[in-house]
Image (cartoon, coloured by chain):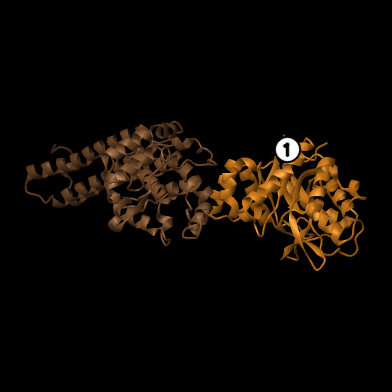
Amino acid sequence: MAAIDGPALGSGLSYRPQFRGDLFAHRDEVDFLEIIADHYLDASIEKRAELELLNSHFPLVAHGLDLSIGSAEGLDSRYLDKLAALIERIDPPWWSEHLCFTRAGGISIGHLASLPYTREAIDVVARNVDVVRRRIKTPLILENITCVVRIPGGEMDEPEFLTRTLEATGCGWLCDVANMHVNATNFGVDLESGFERWPWDRLVQIHYAGGRERDGVLIDSHDAATSDAVWRLYDRVIARAPVKAVVLERDEKIPPFGELLDEVARARRTLVEFGRWR
Amino acid sequence: MQNIAILNLPGPEFLNVFGLVVILVLGAAYLSIRLADRTDRRPPPPVPQNPDAMEVAFLQGGVNQVIRTLIYDLAQRGFVALAAEDHVVPTDKLPQPGELNAMESRLLDAVQAKPKAHALFEARGLRRGLLEQLAPVRAKLAAEKLIKPKSVKIWRRRAQIGGTLIIVGLAFAKIYVEWTTGPGNVAYLIFLAGASVAALFALAYVLTRTHASRRGHAYLDAMRLAYGGRLKEAVGHIGSPGPEARAFHGAALFLIALFGFAPLKGTTEAMFTEAFSRGSGSDGADCGTSCGGSCGDGGASGGGD
């Protein structure tokens, strides 16, 4: 059973203003866009016009950065109000946030920080998701993040933590295959042997991206083409589970737009091959 | 007429009433002209992936913008050049058979006489010929409700005539009453009436000077927002060595049609901005002066801008 009722959106792109002109010139090669919600929360007139333009030309989904769904102290209600207004304005089939915390003790830490893999953390996330649902009716899906350090005291591993969190919250899963690959590589986890332990029945959307290696550690920096290893994992995931949308993320060192389109087309081919997209 | 109470008001009180009437007339004129164009009840069409330069130019600034865009394109392709004192001159390069379309050929013919830039805007034969060539473009834009509907022109005329009759009629009635009851100072009233009529015509001009409808303006705004980044990129290429120096060649020509010559300021092609600014009283960044009073006809009669 699908995690949420929503249309399949195909192969899309995480929007950046730098390639707006090229994007419109190749509109039919991008099935939909993902916008960063935080870029439009306190939007200027120009940003609102940009949002209107994007919304009138592409199906949109929103991706939040700073809701801090794992904060034990609860959510920032003002931030949530702004997010709700944005979601209402663009009316996406779903929206996404990271399964992490970005605020603690009232202080924004400016980073997606990993939660401890504990039952208590799951309860916190479930409580916060309830608050979000009362304010935003559009389905929320949660994304697995990269982990710099494992928080001591964990009671389970990442697949189990993610599975139990999605069960407790009823949320769908935004599977970032690049993050899966980074975590598996950096922590020496064999993705292959534990592949079936991930919550594939909750899968809604996929993120893929390229990163870099520094001092033997993979970093999900979104500044390079998607690696072969991530593509292999992507293909495996598409073959394994129904997915409604896939998104290429590229934040830095943005290449000629044709290269991004090549990746979007590559991702679409696999979707089509496995009947996930027309 | 002496029995009408308003006309028997003392001068200052009458001027207050007169001022109020003028404000009401201007307000009514504004509303009637604005409401004659209800094309924005529908959202604009999607921004095209490959905008047609002539369509964009015609919508943006009528025939004048088409002339600017074509001249720029011919110059990029080496057929014309800008010379001293804003003259547009042909080069030694001759087009191969079929290399130029009908409009380009027509303009190249017009340039053989080495006219000044502004003379191209005033050449009635050239304008008429281009308008004939642009008829399909115009029909397409009109079908999309991107050009101001004829009702705008009708209501503009009604507002101008009706408003003028009210303002001048009220002023004359007061002057008549003043003269029949004895000598009075009506000089300020005459000045005020003249200024009010001028304001009425100015308002009508401002509201109808472009021939894009409100839907057309929304469409152009969306296109500017969508492709603004490409403009910056193209301007950055101007003057660079190699073929990319022809930054607005081919598919990118619509950027000149859309944004005019203003973005060329500060580049090695700034002479276009200057020549056509002196020539048209506009740098082509908008069509503020390019449509004259010819709203809806794409500038068929508006050569003297």
Say if residue B188 shows up in the picture: yes
Instruction: Tell me if residue A252 comes above or below residue B112 in the rendering.
Output: below
Please indicate whether residue B138 sits to the left or right of residue B43 in the image.
Answer: left
Residue behind mark 1: A6
Instruction: Tell me if residue B138 comes above or below residue A78 in the rendering.
Output: above
How crowded pointer 1 is (Cα within 10 Å; few <14, some 14-19, many 20+) is rated as: few
User: Residue B84 at x, y = what percent?
Assistant: 29, 58
Q: How many marks?
A: 1
Q: Amino acid at mark 1?
A: Gly
Please indicate whether residue B198 sits to the left or right of residue B244 in the image.
Answer: left
Q: Nearer the viewer, residue B5 or A64?
A: A64
Colour of chain A in the image? orange
Q: Which chain is brown?
A: B
Please indicate whether residue B57 sits to the left or right of residue B198 in the image.
Answer: right
For the point 60% across and 44% down, which residue is it? A26
User: Residue B167 at x, y = what percent?
Assistant: 22, 42
